[in-house]
Image (cartoon, rainbow, N blue to C red):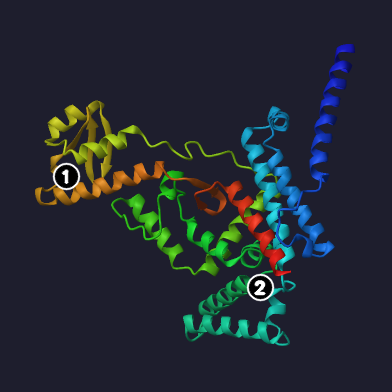
Amino acid sequence: MENQLTTEKISGKLSDDFDLSIEKIVNKPVVTTDIPNWNKADATLQNKLQLVLQRVNLSKSLLNEDIAKWINASNESYELTSLKTYLLLTGANMLGEISRTELPMTFLSWLDTSNSVTTKSIREESINKAINSIGVIDDQQKAIKLIKSVFAQYRLNNSIESNYFSFFTDALDSDTQNWIAANCWIYQDNPLEKWANLQNVKEGYSNITSNENKRLTNARKRWDTLDSYQKLFEISQFIETLFNQYNLCQTNAPVKLDKDPIAKVWRDIDQAVSDYKINYLSNSLFNQLGSDGQKFKFNEVRCVFKEEELIVFEGDVREKDRDLWLKRLSDWVKTKIDAGNSTGETIFLNSKNQALVLSEYNFSTSLERWIDKAIKNILSKK
């Protein structure tokens, strides 16, 4: 009993010390001397922005070794990363609310004919655009399609649901908006692809040498047809869904082999193709030599890589197609290699078969950069 009381007393003191250290970080004002136009803002705006800055400061403090060890003692390490991301998402949400120029409207209010001239103009343009895309509304299916199209335009222009769209379109400056639209994209398809495959799909991607790449290409083409405004809307919706999952304490463990290492074999195969170390073998010899090599199939051609030589089943490649097939194979292998050198992060939403692909920076670093840009932009407009 004495040992139990002593243990509980020590444990309680450590817990109290941890709570106290966190509380100090939360309540500590953030130095704002380096933020342009800070002193020009009124006290109300300064107080709101201080709350955002404190969230960012708290998220950074979670990386402190003394704080992280207590959190990781009873939680998985990825949960600490999720907590950091969640804090940053709350900051972005607050900035979106701060930057709203008008109160959000419900769909019925948006349809009301007594709205302002600006709202009327946007609504009429949206409805006309929907009608022109559908044509004569002469059956129920077309009517439903029209309603969906008009509602989508409402959400795009005046959604009551999300502060995140306001964060991307109002809080951020145009240069940052353009950077996000150009360097981030949302993959929408089933099944979800691996980190390396998605990171490798760049604008203009047209490598269709495999079924895997055809699917990636089609997903990217869909994204590239959207304008910047629509891209920011889709990204905002993705992030809002992620935020709502965090609110429900739904944090997913990282996918195994999320950033799957590029096996040395792909580099070796690339070298073999470059050096033309290729042997086209008959069925019997192919099966005999390929029994313990690295097997794969490309464009319906069976291949084995063994002892620095690429062995190909000769019945699958016609003589006249060999050079073209080798070029396509080489391009495909290079996508595997290039993906390993990509930087950024991919966030998965398995429930929606979506993935947000970010270039150059991971998600939390990107959020920190965007929040910093948003705060400065908001202050510059006041």
- Which x, y percent locates residue 84? 67, 43
What's under tag 2, amino acid-wise? Asn
Looking at the image, is 121 positioned above or below residue 306?
below
Q: Secondary structure at mark 1?
A: helix
- Which x, y percent locates residue 370? 62, 56
- Which x, y percent locates residue 162? 68, 63
Residue placed under numbered mark 2 in the picture: 158
Marks 1/2: CA–CA distance: 56 Å
Which part of the image, by quadrant, shows the C terminus?
bottom right
Give the image quarter of residue 69: top right
- Position of 201 with respect to 289 (left or right) is right
The residue located at (79%, 41%) in the rendering is: 25
Give the image quarter of residue 225: bottom left
- Position of 202 with respect to 78 (left or right) is left
Looking at the image, is 158 positioned above or below residue 119?
above
- Which x, y percent locates residue 263? 36, 34
Q: Residues within 10 Å of mark 2 (few under 14, many from 20)?
A: many
Residue placed under numbered mark 1 in the picture: 316
Q: Residues within 10 Å of mark 1 (few under 14, many from 20)?
A: some
The residue located at (71%, 53%) in the rendering is: 34
Q: Secondary structure at mark 2?
A: helix
Residue 173 has which mark? none
Which part of the image, by quadrant, shows the N terminus?
top right
- Position of 106 with respect to 241 (left or right) is right
The residue located at (13%, 31%) in the rendering is: 284
